[in-house]
Amino acid sequence: MNKKNQKKLYVTITMDVDPDANIAVEGSITPVSPEMDRRISIRETRWGLYILFRIADILDLPLTVFWEARTLNLVNLTWPELINAYRQKKNCEHGCHGYRHEDYDGKKSGQKLSFEETKALIGKASNIISRTFGCRPAGFRAPYCRLTDNLIKALGTFSFQYDASITVKQDKSPPKPYQIGEESEGQIREIPLYQGRDSKGEPVSGYLWQLFEGNRTPDQYLSLVQGTARKFPGCMLQIAIHPWHLRANKKNQSPARIGKAGVSKLWYFLKKLQKIPNVELVTVSEYLGL
Ligand SMILES: [Zn+2]
């Protein structure tokens, strides 16, 4: 269904499924998890996926999930019932978040990936997601939200319908879809992330990063949704979550201490979000009518 009601704000809950608290490092195109001696861990991501699934199930929330293909494989190998639960969930869309969370533009690694390298990685990732869930991913979110021209071209090659990596700011433009890429090389739609301002004029984005780090409250994010609904009806606001963030902080520390508070703050936020007038929760594909 193409969502065209110009009185409502459409909100999608997105999840970037990637290794625990991953960070880009110099000299490597793939990330590491802090405290892991230059390796990655997925322990907190797996638990976060389980918790988010339970919450989405109880509250009947649509989800748009961007899978890093290597993490998807690892979770499937070690906890297949969990992936099976996502496979069977209604209103759950499966998109792509790279093969091994590559630093495609080389900002940190120092190695910008060519079109051929980018295409090979996106093809591999897309195949793993298709094989696991039985349908090709329509959506993509670039690791670190850093979209390159080579990525846009590669996404067109594999028939992706949209990207969701670029952030628009309140003062500049509304969070509504627009075309990206060269016409001659196949265009796709951009579904932008959004950064608004709080009552003090400070920037606040739809990523719940600062909620889980303890720097913002659920009510501040509810204000962001209400403000966006007033300013930009008919548009789409993405609320973005990393599953690992429910159990660990950005340094991959103290899961036991942070876990409980993170889950209860998220639960409070989502329950209130569902009740905001003129807000409808959907997947991105449902919003676009794909
Ligand atoms: Zn990521």
Image: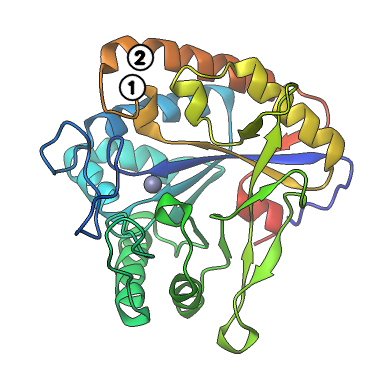
What percent of the width, then of the height, locates residue 201?
73, 28
What percent of the width, then of the height, locates residue 102?
31, 59
Residue 289 seen in this snapshot: yes
- Is the Cβ of the residue at disc 2 closer than 8 Å to that at disc 1? yes
Q: Which mark is residue 146?
A: none
Residue at 70%, 52% (x, y): give it. Answer: 287
Residue 49 seen in this snapshot: no
Residue at 48%, 72% (x, y): give it. Answer: 155
Residue at 64%, 85% (x, y): give it. Answer: 183
Q: Look at the numbered disc 1 and say if its residue's Cβ is closer than 8 Å to ligand 1.
A: no
Instruction: Give the residue type at disc 2.
Output: Ile
What percent of the width, then of the height, locates residue 225?
72, 30
For disc 1, the neighbor class at 10 Å (few under 14, some 14 to 19, many from 20) is many
Residue at 61%, 36% (x, y): give it. Answer: 205
Residue at the extreme left of the image, as rendered: 37
Q: CA distance from mark 2 to mark 1?
A: 6 Å
Task: Report the side of 262 relative to 84 (left or right).
Answer: right
Q: Which mark is residue 258?
A: 2
What percent of the width, then of the height, locates residue 240?
53, 38
Residue at the extreme bottom of the image, as rendered: 184
Q: Which mark is residue 247?
A: 1
**Looking at the figure, which quarter contains the C terminus?**
bottom right
- Front residue of this view, candidates 70 and 62: 70
Name which of mark 2 and mark 1 comes first in the sequence: 1
Task: Report the side of 168 relative to 228 (left or right).
Answer: left
Up the image or down, 126 lies above or below 250; here it is below
Q: Look at the numbered disc 2 and say if its residue's Cβ is closer than 8 Å to ligand 1.
A: no
For disc 2, the neighbor class at 10 Å (few under 14, some 14 to 19, many from 20) is some
Instruction: Give the residue type at disc 1.
Output: Arg
- Front residue of this view, candidates 272 and 117: 117
